[in-house]
Amino acid sequence: MRNAPALVVVFLFLGAFIIPVAEMKFRKLVPWLVLTPALLSSSLVFVMRARVWSEGPIRFHVGGWAPPWGIEMFVDEYTTTMLTAIFVVAVPVLLYSMASIPHELSPHLTSRYHALNLLLLGSLCGMTMAGDIFNLYVFMEISSLAACGTISAKGSRESVEASLRYFLLSELGSGCILLGIAIVHTLTGHLNMGLCLESMPYAASLAPSNVAAAAGLVSIGLLVKGALFPLHIWLPDAHAAAPTPSSAILSGLVVKVAAFALWRVLNRAFGSEVASSLRIFDIILLMATLGIILGSALALNQVHLKRMLAFSTVGQVAYVFLGLGLDSETAVRGAFLHLINHAVAKACLFLSAGAIWQKLGVSSIQKMAGIGRLMPVTMVCYSLAALSMVGIPPLGGFTSKWYLAKGALEAGRPFYVLVILVGSFLALLYTFPPLASSFFAARTDFRPVGSDGFREAPAAMLVSIVILGAACLIMGMDSSIAAQIIR
Amino acid sequence: MAETSLLPLVAVSTPTVSGVLVYAFGKKALSAARVLTVLASALSLVPMALMYPIVTGGGILEVRLPSLLPPLGLTFRVDGLGYLFSATTSGVWCLVTVYAVSYMKGAFNQARFFAALLQTLGACLGVATAGDLFTLFVFFEVLSLAAYVLIVHDQTQEAMRAGFKYLVMSIIGSLSLFFAVVSTYDVSGTLSLESRGSIPEKSSLTLAIFIAFMVGFGMKAGVFPLHVWLPDAHPIAPAPASALLSGIMIKAGAYGIIRVFYNVYGVELITASKWPSLLMGASGASMVLGSAVAILQNDLKRRLAYSSIGQMGYILAGVSLANSHALAGSIFHVFGHALAKSCLFLCAGLVASMTGVKDVEAMAGVGRRMPVTMMAFTAAALSMIGIPPFNGFVSKWWLSLGAVRAGVPIMLGLYLACSMMACIYTLPLVVSAFFGPEPKDRRVEHTCGFEAPLGMLVPVMVLAMGTVLFSIVPGNFVLVLSNVWAEGAGLR
């Protein structure tokens, strides 16, 4: 089990490479090849979690080469938390995609899409566990390309356009990051985060402006990928145009991993002195404040359900940045909790939106009236997730908002409590009208898509929606989970 | 002194769990769902009865569930005040549920209505038995959301609009409450409602927290100027739901304010500061304005809703006077008004469904067609006005005594003026109902009989008897407990 960190990535990548090959001969095996690697990797994460808890952080040296030369994978409690978030979302989403992708894409694309999805997940795990910054960069590039592929998978004009826009902006960010990494390497001679951190004070005393430039470039790049306002402009189109499972993964995980990576790099490679002397956290706080309020406000006047959910991600990911930017213990804890809670809730929302579209052909908020009577299970899960996002007890989002607010007070910045509250209020305003009309309005004339009439979505889709909806409730009800997220 | 007991937990979880069951299986087995609804609300009375000897003996029941609901866990704790509130809640609820089962017969989507009815009962009991502010807040929030379902049940355009207004206002309230609770935890390090005040000192922050608490709870209590949602939302719901909204749920706000005054801030801090005058001003205004506007309403249920705003003013003014007489009067009025207002709304619902009369002006002659209903209405109205020997008189007596003792005689004047206004907005319609000439064109929807069916009449009669019973039988335990709790809070 010493190889566990590497194996997590390897399983997913292997799956990605086998699927297109398997498609040629054994078409029926493909769905199983999607889920198996994810299940294997998630069980490894489970094992690693237990080990990190009992024995402390795992440092795995790829090929047995020690850090100054070799690649290090670093797994501590925060990493396992992030990995848990990835798999809690990924497994239901992959299950869902097995049933929904044949509907959404043309048949010759399905297996390629599944392969890209696994590639994306593997690279996200790699980013999370990366112990050196260049390694982080490599995985990030894989994730950007894979994400671009999945966004454009539908092949429609708007999805290709959104994918291109994402590609351009994200590569701009990658360029910044690569430049920053190069500067760090010239300053310290290292790429390993731990070693960078050791020589950073000396480098900062020698060439403070170079260090500032490096930190700034890396931060900007990761903020673009994390879609923190006003660098979010690529997000709404991309998340709305992608196939449903990808929307869930992009909104739930990809932006969160970028936020996590930023926090990681600032704390483990640059050190908090450099970050605080550059006031990076203050800038992040300012952007997060704008993101929470304006992102949510933009979500208010959306017509399409998926676009509304995408804008809501802009607002919600800003909460994560807010918690990380406050930099107090409770706030960071809140940020991690929110990261998971929002990932689960947003994935559930996107999957429900997809199920509604697939069964009833409804994609605009206006036309949702009466859906609650037709698809009660889906809509109850949708409501749980939406209310969790607003932060209503006893759902998961409430717990994270509690920690964030408490953290803001502990940091002596009660202003941000106000920001959190205003954000919650706006979230209610944009999530509630579709909910209310779907349950409490008279049914309009629906035309069912498909031959089986008005029914819930197929079992695989419904099960994954229910798993995620139940997770929203359990996250809010069981305190041992919140306590275990980060001790 | 606190003994561990699962009774509060049983009281809260019975309706909550049954509510989920009713929603899940209500469409397939409606009659079973109706039986379960009545059964669950009746069963919530059992723990109340079992708690009675302990609480009247001065005991306190407590149960902690640290593993449920992060970050602080749930705590239930029942003392005299909590017991009074929860016993009133489940008593009135049980009667209203019996009424609702026959009232809603044939209505659409009953399962959803009954499920929401049970959820709100669970949430109300949760608020009343909460042992710390965190638990209280959680149930308060659940209450707000579940009540939305009751308000918009008819799904008319009007109902949806009133419901949305209600929801937006109550979310503003609960966000303000969220701020208050989190900051209280930050300032005092505890949220327990055990102490007689955990906020350490007077400062601008604690004043801000105080105001946030008042906004949060005041929103639900419908105190001026936060009442704007109330006159739309309360009357639009089906009659049993209006009865509970105006009779019980509105009191959850008052309950919270009492807890904040005497368990979170404590008597010393409250009496040393001028903060109660904030509440006193607001409640005086809602008393006068609520009662005055009630006179102008032509729609009976709307009139009753405005009257609730006025009556809540009585209760909150009593709390803000900060002495034991006034507080005991307030607590007793929570009880008395719960019986009276739910009885009034149920009667209004009966009149509307039997004769189709919704307006005050059209009430003439209704009393002769539905004598029992209108007698009950009259009794409840008299109690609300405060005429001896009804409950309302007892609470008004103690409230007035408190006003005099606190040295705020103007409040005594307001109490009397509002009693007068209550006469004006209830008695003329009662008189015309019994003695007025019946309009010729009255369309009687149920030709078979004039009086309502027994299933609805009995709960109304029990409530009406309750409005007089407690003040005439010796050993009025509600009043005794109110007094004991008020003195126990450290008030003189």
Image (tube, coloured by chain):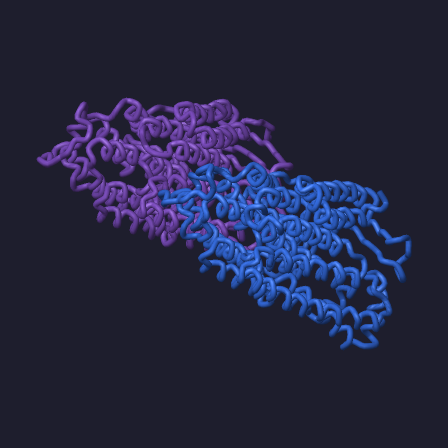
Rendering coords of residue A27 (x, y %): 67, 42
What chain is the purple one? B
Q: Is residue B435 visible?
A: yes
Rendering coords of residue A470 (x, y %): 58, 39
Residue at the far front in the pictured view: A25
Rendering coords of residue A322 (x, y %): 62, 60
Q: Residue at x 42, y 25 (%)?
A: B29
Q: Residue at x 34, y 34 (%)?
A: B108
Q: Residue at x 61, y 34 (%)?
A: B64
If the image is split into quadrants, where does the N terminus of chain A sit?
top right
Q: Residue at x 30, y 36 (%)?
A: B345
Q: Is residue A370 above or below residue A176?
A: above
**Residue B69: quadrant of the picture:** top right
Of B250 and A418, nearer the camera is: A418
Of B356 and B214, nearer the camera is: B356
Q: Is residue B404 visible?
A: no
